[in-house]
Image (cartoon, rainbow, N blue to C red):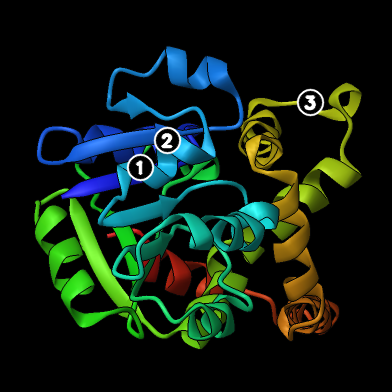
Amino acid sequence: MKILIVGMGAMGTWLAQQLHPKHDLCLWDHNPARLSTSCWGRPLRSSEEIRLAAPDMVINSVNLAQTGSVMSGLIPLLPKTTIFSDMASLKGDLQNAYSQWQRPFLSFHPLFGPLFKPIPMQERKTIVLISESDNEAKTWFCHQFHEPEYQIRELTFEAHDHAMILTLGLPFLLSLLGLHIVTPQTAVGSGLAAFLGHSQKVLCESPDLVVAVMKKVLSSDLPDMIKQSLEHWKRQTAEESFSLDYFNKKRGEFIM
């Protein structure tokens, strides 16, 4: 299959590495330097070269804010049979956009970006596959990642974005909260330093993604859930009923 990957950042490069041995890859990025250092496919440097390439599939791995506009710009250049694909961390209005574009599509989301690195080798990497995607494209995708290190989970557009409130939103929220409260000068002790070290990884994420996720988080029930938990523990402490039972229960649930 001839595949065009648009956007050769961290995730675009990862995808090219995965697909390069099996497929004819073309690469495009607005930054020519990224193309000159890539050995995973043939660089395309103009709209005319993209048109002449006529790929069977185009995979958009640009940042969240540019996903829709990049896809719209590619539509006049590519055959109607080209499968449009995205790796967006939040799907938002993409479902409506795909309906308007009237192209077969494949939407997925690898859940191992900068915040979650490094991933221990023994842990399986989860990829969410959007269930409304074209059936043949989904079958193709599952075949590409049918390896022990990957776990594919299928969700609808709506269920995916709702799941991201916890999957991305909770780590983002707690990380930013820690960075807001604590300064490097007050970070005393290895435990706090380790927490801040992990929290700082959120700063490696795309600012567009962090803002979009935090908007979803702050308009969801998650802040109220956190507030209610804190108030519950405060009442237990005041009543001297806070014990090790809760701690031991959670340790049993999460530490095997």
Q: Which mark is residue 49?
A: 2
Q: Is residue 120 above or below residue 102?
A: above
Please name the residue that numbered disc 1 is placed on.
52
Query: Residue 43's quadrant in the figure?
Result: top left
Q: Which mark is residue 226?
A: none
Q: Which of 74 and 137 lies nearest the eye of the viewer? A: 74
Left/right placement of residue 17 relative to residue 30 reads: left
Q: Residue at x 63, y 34 (%)?
A: 191
Q: Amino acid at mark 2?
A: Glu
Q: Residue at x 40, y 57 (%)?
A: 78
Q: Which of 10 and 184 lies nearest the eye of the viewer? A: 10
Q: Is residue 80 above or below residue 21?
A: below
Q: CA distance from mark 2 to mark 1?
A: 5 Å
Q: Amino acid at mark 3?
A: Val
Please name the residue that numbered disc 3 is placed on.
188
Q: Are marks 2 and 1 in contact (CB under 8 Å)?
A: yes
* Residue 57 image offset from top left, x and y in percent: 30, 56
Q: CA distance from mark 3 to mark 1?
A: 59 Å
* Residue 210 image offset from top left, x and y in percent: 72, 53
* Residue 23 image offset from top left, x and y in percent: 15, 41
Query: Residue 220's quadrant in the figure?
Result: bottom right
